[in-house]
Every structure is written in structure tokens, then in C-alpha cells.
């Protein structure tokens, strides 16, 4: 039977690459976007071009809103019957700044999306998934590095995702559900433009031990492996996909 993955923030970047990879592997894909319907439609088209044997749906969902998250899971269940994996990916950065210069609205936006939103998605996954399924949370290497002068709020929000991963893996392990995280480094996506530095990946990539920024597909491959049966004894793990950064 065709398996189904639910991916938050599947319209662009890492979420899009993950959607296309799962589609290419023959999974059904339920992806979400928050405002960019055209990008979500393009991801669906990319899934369909990827040698697709399953089906794809895209639903608007703001992870900061509880009803919206619940409705996303309901839509996926209504369309596909069951959910076999959840990729808890949606996330934002704000403009680069020192902590001293951050206003409360910006910090609330970051924590509401990256912490509250991710916890709501993880909670719905915990309520929905059955034995033999898996969750991957998308953290960031920023959780280890702290992101001084760029976005300490974002780094802190991702540290919360690491803790979520460890705790939820222990809660759900006895139910046969695995929970892991990836910690991407500098990956070439739109997120850097949101931080006011569109060329950030190009500029900082060469400083990584591997000498370049990462491609979203390289993160997607790690997410797919963590969800696949090849990682059947892996839970509570946080995998750095950061080129050694
Ligand atoms: P991106 O290209 O900016 O895409 C962000 C995605 O999240 C989009 O699909 C966006 O939807 C969605 N989104 C934003 N706010 C949302 C909300 N409130 N509710 C639901 N969806 C929302 O970002 P990315 O680089 O692929 O990042 C994906 C994840 O990887 C994030 O958690 C990020 O923190 C993490 N990460 C990225 C990097 C990197 O260098 N790129 C490094 C480490 C970790 P719309 O298209 O509708 O706006």
C-alpha cells in the first residue's frame, strides 16, 4: 500500500526538496504552505514530474494556529486514509540583528512559528501516527552555534526543537514511533533573503569544512533515510547535515 508523508512548509526550500524526493520514491505527499500558493502548486507539479506513482495535495496551514494544524492533519487523513511519516519543517528567521536590538514582535514571531508551531505539529503527529511510523523535526546547526550577531532568537528556537526530539522520542518509542531531527547548516534556500542577506549561503558556504553551502536535496536525503526502514533502530537522534559546520 502506498505510504503517505505530511510535510509542513513544503512549498519551498528544504520542504519542497523533501516532497519531491518522497514523491520520486512512490509516496503520497500532503504538503502545506502558509501564503505562497503558487510555490506550493509548483511543488505539486514537480512531484508529479518526479516519476510519481502516488498523489499529492497542498493545503494552506499556519503552524502558529492550532485549528489550522488540526485541519491539515484531517485533510491528509481524509485524502489518504493514514499518515506514515511527518516532516516538521516549517520555520522562519527574522532580519539579522544583535539580541540587544531585537524588538518583542520579532521574537514572538520567531518563537510562535518555530517553537509553538513545531510543538503543535508534533502534538498532532503524536495523536495521529501508529506503530511503525516516524517523525523528523527540522532543527538547525544554529542550535549548537548560537548565531551571535545574526539571530540568537532563531538559534534558541531550534534548540527547543532538539529537546522536543529527545523527549518525544522517549514518549513515543514504546508505541513503535520513531522521532529524530536533522540540523541543517547553510543550505541554499529563500530563508536567507528573509534574514535580509539573500547571498548568505553563497558568501558563508566556502567557510564550511566541506567548502560550500548545502543543497536542499542533501537535507531531503537525510530526512528520507531517517524515516525509512533503513533507520529502524534510530530514534531520539539529531543528525547534523551541515558540511561540518
Ligand atoms: P524557506 O525556503 O524560507 O521555506 C519556508 C517554508 O515554511 C515555506 O514553505 C513557508 O511557506 C513555510 N512557512 C513559513 N512560515 C510558516 C507558518 N507560520 N506556517 C506554516 N508554514 C510556514 O525555508 P527553508 O530554508 O527551506 O527552511 C525550512 C526549515 O529548515 C526551517 O525550519 C528552517 O529553520 C530550517 N533550516 C534551514 C536552513 C537553511 O540554511 N536554509 C538551515 C538550518 C535549518 P510559504 O512558501 O507559503 O511562505
Image (cartoon, grey):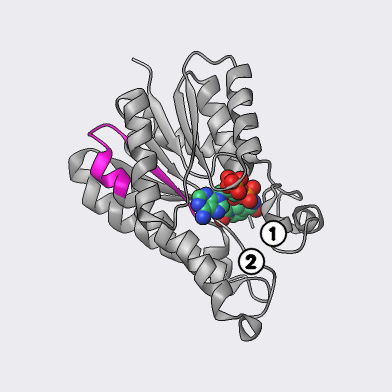
Quarter of the figure with residue 233: top left
Nearer to me, 180 or 130: 130
Using the image, tell me which numbered label, if any, was put on residue 85: none
SS under mark 1 = helix
Percent across and percent down for residue 115 are 43, 62
Quarter that holds the N terminus: top left
The answer to whether residue 204 is left or right of residue 242 is right
Q: Is residue 242 visible?
A: no
Range covered by the magenta-colored residues: 124-139
Q: Which residue is mark 2?
A: 94
Percent across and percent down for residue 140 are 55, 57
Q: Residue at x 59, y 42 (%)?
A: 14
Percent across and percent down for residue 201 are 75, 54
Nearer to me, 140 or 94: 94
Q: Residue at x 59, y 39 (%)?
A: 11
* Residue ranking furthest to the left: 174
Q: Looking at the picture, does residue 15 appear above or below residue 120? A: above
Q: Residue at x 45, y 22 (%)?
A: 27
Quarter of the figure with residue 196: bottom right
Quarter that holds the C terminus: bottom right
Q: Which residue is mark 1?
A: 194
Q: Is residue 190 visible?
A: yes
Assess whether residue 127 is covered by the magenta stretch: yes
The answer to whether residue 227 is left or right of residue 99 is left
* Residue ranking furthest to the bottom: 100
SS under mark 2 = loop
Q: Are marks 1 and 2 in contact (CB under 8 Å)?
A: yes
Q: Residues within 10 Å of mark 1 (few under 14, many from 20)?
A: some
Assess whether residue 75 is covered by the magenta stretch: no
Amino acid at each position: 500500500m502506498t505510504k503517505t508523508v505530511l510535510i509542513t512548509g513544503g512549498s519551498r526550500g528544504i520542504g519542497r526538496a523533501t516532497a519531491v524526493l518522497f514523491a520520486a520514491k512512490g509516496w503520497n505527499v500532503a504538503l502545506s504552505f502558509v501564503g505562497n500558493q503558487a510555490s506550493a502548486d509548483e511543488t505539486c507539479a514537480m512531484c508529479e514530474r518526479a516519476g510519481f506513482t502516488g498523489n499529492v495535495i497542498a493545503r494552506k496551514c499556519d503552524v502558529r494556529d492550532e485549528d489550522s494544524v488540526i485541519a491539515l492533519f484531517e485533510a491528509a487523513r481524509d485524502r489518504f486514509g493514514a499518515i506514515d511519516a511527518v516532516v516538521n519543517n516549517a520555520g522562519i528567521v527574522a532580519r539579522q540583528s544583535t539580541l540587544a536590538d531585537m524588538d518583542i514582535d520579532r521574537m514572538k514571531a520567531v518563537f510562535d512559528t518555530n517553537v509553538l508551531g513545531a510543538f503543535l505539529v508534533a502534538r498532532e503527529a503524536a495523536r495521529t501516527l501508529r506503530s511503525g511510523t516516524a517523525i523528523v523535526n527540522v532543527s538547525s546547526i544554529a542550535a549548537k552555534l548560537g548565531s551571535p550577531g545574526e539571530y540568537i532568537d532563531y538559534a534558541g528556537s531550534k534548540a527547543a526543537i532538539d529537546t522536543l526530539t529527545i523527549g518525544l522520542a522517549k514518549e513515543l518509542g514504546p508505541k513503535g514511533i520513531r522521532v529524530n531531527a536533522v540540523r541543517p547548516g547553510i543550505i541554499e534556500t529563500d530563508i536567507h533573503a528573509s534574514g535580509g542577506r539573500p547571498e548568505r549561503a553563497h558568501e558563508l558556504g566556502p567557510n564550511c569544512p566541506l567548502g560550500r553551502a548545502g543543497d536542499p536535496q542533501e537535507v531531503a536525503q537525510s530526512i528520507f533515510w531517517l524515516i525509512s526502514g533503513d533507520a529502524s533502530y534510530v530514534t531520539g537522534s539529531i543528525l547534523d547535515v551541515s558540511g561540518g559546520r
